[in-house]
Image (cartoon, rainbow, N blue to C red):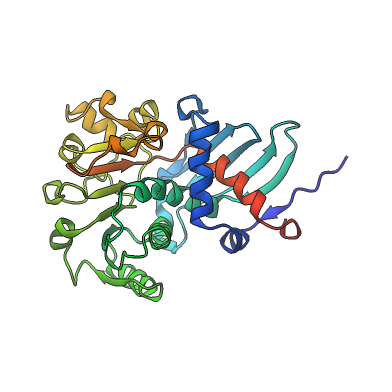
Amino acid sequence: MTIHIPHITDSDIRKHVTYRHAMTALRNALLEDVDPATDFPRQILELADRKQLLFMPSQSRDWVGTKLISVNPLNYRRSIDRVQGVYLLMDSDTTTPRAIIDGSELTELRTAAMSMVVADALLPQDARTVMLFGYGAQARAHLLALKEVRPSLSEVVITGRNQVKAEMFAANAAEHGWDARIGAARSPESTIPQADVIITVTGAGEPLFDSSLVKPGTLVMAIGSHNNDRRELEAELLGRSYVIVEDRATAMREAGDVAMAAAEGAISDDELIELHDFVRDPRLARRDKPIVYKSVGMSWQDLAVAGEVYRRVPQGRR
């Protein structure tokens, strides 16, 4: 029997699925359906020239699926997103394939939406300023998502290794309602102490900024790396912050920001706040200290959002 497997494109996702939709799917998955600690570990195959191939399977009540993506840090030279791939979604009863979903757009959506579950619980309603390290696909997704959950946010300072690309990104952000400036116009050193949110979405292997500048109550979202030997944040910052992670074991295995800080004695794994607990009680992280959310991305997140995408994209578009 021939099975027609519909292809859900990036434009289908953008047209029919909002960050709020994805946030609700992720929050409900944590509350009702998923224990991140039991999720299948991702498989990472190291390729030549620091490229990687990632295989990310998961299962839930309604769905089974897997993402196959590549990560190519050299793609920035070609102005191509460094994450490429596809998602295969199957129903859980028959394991029949139901859709092939654009993997890059799904990754952008679920990563930013997961960050927003944290941000929506912690950011004050009058939050205003964002300090953004990076200007790639996840930087774009996070700014769009932040506008959806906190319309009060209006200022963003963007910095990165390529000033021309930072300027182009700032111009695009301005078209979406941001008062956007680059680091050359307003320095990170002057912005960080005033920022409500600091977002790092880079491929950096070393800390990006002086952590002593971060004030209590500031939310720092470190998204850029899933390698245990690379980090965007100083250990000192994690040592004096509430640190939220998707899963303790996964963070210690894959999150360099966490694993390296633990190895240096700045934090222990039992101090980490797991998302599973945080969504039930956001008071686990208070504003008397900085709050760090470190994400490496997990397979259950892709599955939860892929199911939501399948439900919301009209049948005729599949």
Image location (x, y in percent) of residue 13: 59, 58
The residue nearer to you, when weighing 6 against 80, is 6
Give the total number of marks visible in the rendering. 0
* Residue 175 x, y percent position in the rendering: 40, 76
Q: Position of residue 42 (x, y in %)?
A: 49, 32
Position of 216 with respect to 89 (left or right) is left
Give the residue displayed 35% in from the left and 43% down from the top: 225
**Residue in front for this viewpoint, 13 or 116:** 116
Observer-nearest of 7 and 75: 7
Is residue 54 visible to us here? no
Q: Is residue 316 left or right of residue 264?
A: right
Give the residue at x 32% y 37%: 244
- Quadrant where the image shows the C terminus: bottom right
Q: Residue furthest right?
A: 1
Q: Quadrant of residue 90?
A: top right
Could you tell me which quadrant the N terminus lies in? top right
Across and down, in percent, residue 116 comes to 40, 50
Residue at image coords 55%, 32%: 33
Q: In the image, is 167 to the left or to the right of 15?
A: left
Compared with 263, 215 (above or below) is: below
Give residue 92's quadrant in the image. top right
Note whether 97 is above or below 141 in the view shown: above
Residue 281 in sight: yes
Q: Nearer the viewer, residue 298 or 146?
A: 146
